[in-house]
Image (spheres, coloured by chain):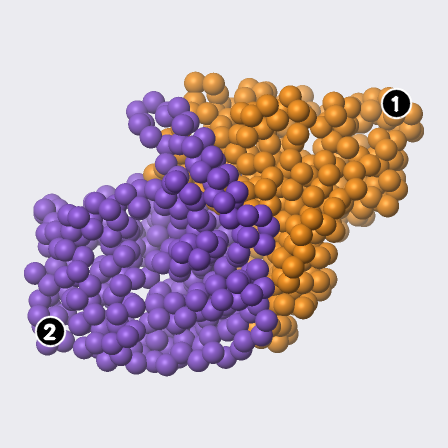
Chain colours: A purple, B orange
Amino acid sequence: MAETPTLIPHTRLTEFITRALIAMKMPKDRADITAGLMVKTDLRGVDSHGIDMLPRYHELWRQGFVVMEAEPVLARDAAATALYDGAKGLGHYVSTLAMRLAIDKARTFGVGIVTVRNSGHFGAAANYSMMALEHGMLGLATTNSPYVAMVPTFGREPKLSTNPISFAAPAGRHAPFVLDMATTTVAAGKLRIASRWKKPIPAGWALDEDGQPTTDPDIAMKKRFMSPLGGSRELGGHKGYGLGMMVDILSGVLPGATYGDLFQRTGRYEQKKQDVGHCFVAIDPERFRPLEDFKHDMDDMFDSVKSTSPAEGQTRVYVAGEPEAESEKRRTREGIPINATLMGLVNDLAKGLGIPALG
Amino acid sequence: MAETPTLIPHTRLTEFITRALIAMKMPKDRADITAGLMVKTDLRGVDSHGIDMLPRYHELWRQGFVVMEAEPVLARDAAATALYDGAKGLGHYVSTLAMRLAIDKARTFGVGIVTVRNSGHFGAAANYSMMALEHGMLGLATTNSPYVAMVPTFGREPKLSTNPISFAAPAGRHAPFVLDMATTTVAAGKLRIASRWKKPIPAGWALDEDGQPTTDPDIAMKKRFMSPLGGSRELGGHKGYGLGMMVDILSGVLPGATYGDLFQRTGRYEQKKQDVGHCFVAIDPERFRPLEDFKHDMDDMFDSVKSTSPAEGQTRVYVAGEPEAESEKRRTREGIPINATLMGLVNDLAKGLGIPALG
């Protein structure tokens, strides 16, 4: 049975994560950035990619898959493009540098694209696409992962990661458009959360070892045989599979990072070489039309879709990013819910690192 | 009952479409480009976006929604971005100009993005993303349409078009990666083809007027209440809806073209103002790593996914673009199948335009 979660103020959560990262040898300025992004993710209600990842980051660090004091290197930089080497660090810091550079390039050239190789998990993709918003720009962020999960259409083994894509664009009166989606039916973190809360999962999220749909979150989490968005071929699963490949090409093949099942197939696991890849794009809408006109049409489009008559049993039609913006307001006020399992995990972690417990 | 189709050589089909477009007042050089792209689409087996569209183009021209002799205008051009005004023409010609310009910009800046407003239907999105391939580049193409089809998640009325996205990337030994997908479960053309061939459609493609799934292709075609990729919210339909919005932002809001249900909502139908928008991006992979290394990894990734053990009852795992490349070889040799209904339609059209029948 799931227990009532404890509500933790976001400032306290930020402080806790910062301390934990510093105790793992991450320099303070980077720990601030990383903890800030992780807590922002929790505030936005994306429970799978914030504090919930901390035990995993700790494990990866202890096992030598991630170097917390890594110094990213700008490996290539020309006109509207650049490439960072993440030097085996966690992904949040190098991704922040990369998206900042993409935005600078978009200011100069109208569009900028910066890729990253040799990185680690970067948290929620939306954290980086959304960086473009405060500059009145459109942002795109993608990442891959060395850990395969998606079973290609017509296949029975996983060959790709959940390869998420995030796209953000500014609006005027309304909250900005922020899409952040795994190209599998659900993100892997959703399986982990379901397993943590002991909740059965819907058929269509994951497969068992016989390739049959399973509703057991522990089997799903253990096997990670996940369906591409769309599900069966007839209902468009080949599109989710195609989008997953597109994200792997942009995030992995383009910068020269890992892709597909390379990590499993070529001894990179034994070498502890995750080599995660990311891709960041910023676009300046002012190169095409005045920003105010762009925002006017965004608001008008949002008004139209939000006024759609709801289906039977529904009350509202949303725009991507709207539920997360509402969560951010609510959780900033009320705190971030941490369940007992996760609280136990992070308190154990704190003890091991010699820092105060979270709660 | 569907009848046996007639096989027409692609050269004869090209000649027929070129003549039909010229008879509709399209200048010869543009008719050559447009017919070439339409027939390439048929060769690649994408039956919904080639010759099958000709009767629709004819209808739009007769009704005054499309001006075949339109002269596209380069409305903005700076650094890595540009904007074309399609001057109410059919989309193929201006889209070819726009993608060529995006490729030129990518050669200079590493990435180029060119949008188009005030355009018409441009056929298959893959025709433009694939233009990047012969330059060793990655290509992206998106379009919207004034005709709504996609019902937003939790809603019961269509508010967006099928808003397709195409992405192409070069490989070495293998056929290039070419994804071309509507962000609805299926493209609207698939409903038209099913209706033409009198084939029932799978539940999950479209809804009837009560918002319930229908298998009747004529009801589906008439109502065009289409599900976003993923279907229900639980199985990720909000992702298909989000992708559809992303495509509308890039194709419509960014260049200042139509978006959402603007055409229905604001008297644009009465003004015969389709104002279709497109977005084209080219990326030069050599800015990140040597092209040969990029192609090597593409081939290696393709080898891996193609070697996936097939699911029960399946024989092969494909890469996006592979079935289309195989169709192109086969149909170049054997001809393009035209069914009796379509043959009747295009022959009637030919008669009206005073050109020889197709067959």
The spot of residue A217 in percent (x, y) is 25, 49
Residue identified by numbered label 2 = A355
Residue at left 24%, top 46%?
Answer: A329
Residue at left 26%, top 72%?
Answer: A31
Quick one: label 1, few (<14), some, or many (20+) residues within 10 Å? few
| Residue B27 higher or lower than B309, as above or below | above
Marks 2,1: beta carbons within 8 A = no
Viewer-closest of B182 and B311 = B182
Quick one: label 2, few (<14), some, or many (20+) residues within 10 Å? some
The spot of residue B96 in percent (x, y) is 73, 50
Residue at left 80%, top 35%?
Answer: B68
| Residue B172 higher or lower than A340, as above or below | below
In the rendered structure, find residue B351 and report the number of the disc placed on it. 1
The spot of residue A190 in percent (x, y) is 29, 51
Viewer-closest of B198 and A23 = A23
C-alpha gap between disc 2 and disc 1 = 84 Å
Tell me the element at label 2.
Answer: loop
Q: How many numbered marks have been drawn onto this rendered protein structure?
A: 2
- Mark 2 and mark 1, same subunit? no
Viewer-closest of A288 and A123 = A288
- Residue B13's image quarter? top right
Viewer-closest of A138 and A208 = A138
A162 vs A238, left or right, is left
Amino acid at pointer 1: Lys
Tell me the element at label 1.
Answer: helix
Amino acid at pointer 2: Ile
State whether residue B289 appears in this view. yes
